[in-house]
Each structure stands twice: as structure tokens, then as C-alpha cells.
Amino acid sequence: MNTQKLTSHSFQSARAANLSAASLLSQVVQTLRRWNQLARQRRQLASLSDEMLKDIGRSRADIEWEASRPFWDDPDRR
């Protein structure tokens, strides 16, 4: 294999690895943002008054159950 082909192949491999790493990093950031969003929403639900919960048709027990779920427990990922 000549030097030009070797360099070209190495560059393409490095580029593919960079794209793969960038894609992985993007997925990690997206997951962390989603987990943060879930944790924030659950804290907000837990802070609602009983009157507000009644308005949205939920009981305090429903909200306590939801708020006690771990942040990584994403209902959209099932």
C-alpha cells in the first residue's frame, strides 16, 4: 500500500471515529437534558397544591408516586 492510500485510509478511519464520538456525545447530552427535564417536572408536580391537583384530575397519591420515581425512569422510552 502506498503512502497516499495509507494516509487516506487513516484519515477516513479517524473521521469516522470522530463522527461516531460526536454522535455518542450528542446522545449523552440529549439523555442528560431529558433526565434533567423529568426531574424538574416531577419536582414541580410535587409542589402543586391539592386544589391544583384536583383541577388536573390527579390525587396527591398519584403525584407522590410519580415524584418518587428515579430521574432515569423515562415513560417515553418504553
Image (cartoon, rainbow, N blue to C red):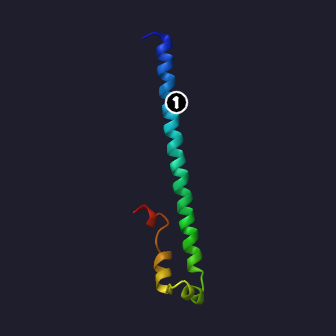
Label 1 Cα crowd, 10 Å radius (few <14 / some 14-19 / many 20+): few
SS category of the residue bearing label 1: helix
Residue at figure coordinates x 51%, y 17% from the top left = 7
Is residue 10 shown above or below 24? Answer: above
- Residue 24 appears in view: yes
Residue at figure coordinates x 50%, y 76% from the top left = 67
The part of the image, by quadrant, that contains residue 43 is bottom right
The part of the image, by quadrant, that contains residue 42 is bottom right
Q: Return the x and y of residue 52 as percentages of the image width and height.
A: 59, 86
Is residue 50 shown above or below 69? Answer: below
Please tell me how many numbered marks the rendered image carries: 1
Is residue 30 shown above or below 11? Answer: below
The quarter in which the C terminus is drawn is bottom left
The quarter in which the N terminus is drawn is top left
Instruction: Name the one closer to the observer, 63 or 55.
Output: 55
Q: Return the x and y of residue 68 as percentages of the image width and height.
A: 48, 75
Mark 1 lies on residue: 15
Q: Return the x and y of residue 4 as percentages of the image width and height.
A: 50, 12
Residue at figure coordinates x 53%, y 34% from the top left = 18
- Residue 74 appears in view: no
Most extreme residue toward the left is 78
Residue at figure coordinates x 59%, y 82% from the top left = 48
Q: Return the x and y of residue 40 as percentages of the image width and height.
A: 58, 69
Is residue 33 shown above or below 44? Answer: above
The three-letter amino acid code for the residue at tag 1 is Arg
